Image (cartoon, rainbow, N blue to C red):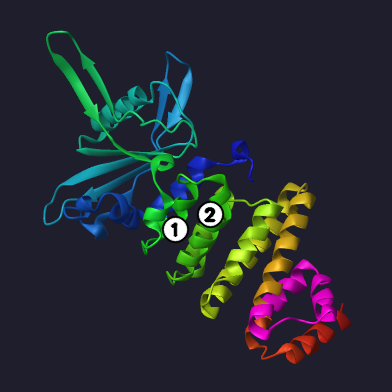
């Protein structure tokens, strides 16, 4: 499982939502699309606020300026991702609202994504100031609390944001391999361009890194998929993870153990795909596949689409190993 402390949650969520902003609204707040002009979305530079009393500096996560449909007037959608439980967060949201309203003098639609795992109790969605005899302020904001959402409710949503955020919803430990496979199955049907597909798949892989045991379960579930096309698409996605993992390893210079796990996962997935296509492979063929390095495995994953049977596979292996 990925080290949660090392994950840049704000960057991941900002990249996801800004890339699929309208899809995000369609999934969670479709009513907003009824009065928003889709072509008008403009993302503003981040706003920086300093809390003098606490000596802390805050930046807004995402701020979009949009136009009302058929009107020459605008409003702001302010979205925050909160990756850890924080007392008095509702006060901070109100400060954001007040300062943004003062600066832009526009209506503001505030949204918070609570993406932490614990606690699972209902998060506060308002900030108020009141006295025994009257209420001074009632500030409300929209809340998406992922750990209270059931991933099964999003299985049939043909939406890239649903595909990504399923990985952060309420998942029982035993369900992690299944959820990861379902995320990939959904992603394989969306027909996104390579860059957007990589964004979603990278998000899922970040939050659903499987252990060796979980990977075994994942592979068993993978074999049960009937569609060859979907299987091949999932194979291509997982191969791209390995390449990204390899690049991260070079940048950080300390990823050897992680790469070994990725190598094993790649070997198993390719063996599963080839066994599904050609039937049970001979022990010699399996051994030769297991002897391939990471680059050769990637080449085999791509070449497998043009191989018709195990004889073609053996010829490809002979050529690849002969040039090694």
From the viewer's perspective, is 2 left or right of 73? right
Quadrant location, the C terminus = bottom right
Residue depicted at x 39% and y 52%: 18
Residue depicted at x 79% and y 51%: 256
Q: Which residue is mark 2?
A: 204
* Element type at mark 2: helix
Q: Residues within 10 Å of mark 1 (few under 14, many from 20)?
A: many
Residue 109 locus on image (x, y percent): 25, 40
From the viewer's perspective, is 192 left or right of 315? left
Q: Which residues are magenta?
A: 275-302
- The mark that comes first in sequence, 2 or 1, is 1
Give the Cα separation between the discs numbered 2 and 1. 8 Å
Relative depth, front residue between 308 and 280: 280
Q: Quadrant of residue 299?
A: bottom right
From the viewer's perspective, is 318 left or right of 29? right
Q: Overall secondary structure of the magenta stretch?
A: helix
Looking at the image, residue 265 lies above or below residue 278: above
From the viewer's perspective, is 2 left or right of 171? right
Q: Which residue is mark 1?
A: 163
Residue 151 shown in magenta: no
Relative depth, front residue between 82 and 229: 229
Relative depth, front residue between 194 and 71: 194
Residue depicted at x 16% and y 53%: 35
């Amino acid at each position: 499982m990925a080290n949660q402390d090392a994950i840049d949650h704000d960057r991941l969520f900002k990249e996801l939502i800004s890339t699929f902003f309208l899809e995000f609204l369609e999934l969670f707040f479709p009513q907003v699309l009824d009065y928003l002009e889709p072509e008008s979305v403009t993302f503003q530079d981040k706003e920086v606020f300093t809390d003098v009393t606490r000596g802390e500096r805050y930046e807004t996560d995402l701020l979009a300026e949009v136009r009302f449909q058929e009107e020459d007037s605008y409003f702001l959608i302010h979205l925050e991702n909160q990756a850890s439980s924080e007392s008095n967060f509702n006060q901070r949201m109100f400060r954001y609202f007040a300062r943004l309203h003062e600066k832009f003098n526009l209506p503001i639609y505030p949204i918070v994504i609570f993406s932490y795992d614990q606690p699972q109790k209902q998060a506060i969605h308002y900030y108020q100031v009141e006295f025994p005899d009257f209420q001074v302020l009632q500030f409300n904001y929209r809340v998406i609390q992922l750990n209270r959402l059931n991933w099964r409710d999003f299985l049939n949503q043909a939406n890239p944001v649903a595909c990504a955020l399923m990985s952060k919803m309420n998942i029982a430990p035993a369900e992690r391999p299944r959820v990861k496979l379902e995320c990939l199955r959904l992603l394989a049907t969306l027909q996104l361009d390579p860059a957007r597909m990589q964004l979603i798949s990278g998000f899922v892989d970040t939050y659903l890194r499987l252990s060796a045991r979980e990977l075994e379960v994942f592979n068993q579930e993978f074999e049960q998929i009937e569609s060859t096309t979907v299987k091949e698409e999932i194979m291509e996605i997982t191969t791209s993870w390995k390449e990204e993992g390899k690049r991260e390893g070079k940048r950080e210079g300390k990823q050897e153990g992680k790469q070994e796990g990725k190598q094993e996962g790649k070997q198993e997935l390719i063996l599963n795909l080839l066994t599904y296509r050609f039937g049970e492979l001979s022990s010699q063929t399996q051994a030769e596949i297991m002897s391939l390095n990471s680059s050769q495995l990637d080449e085999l994953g791509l070449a497998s689409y043009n191989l018709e049977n195990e004889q073609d596979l053996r010829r490809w292996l002979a050529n690849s190993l002969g040039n090694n």
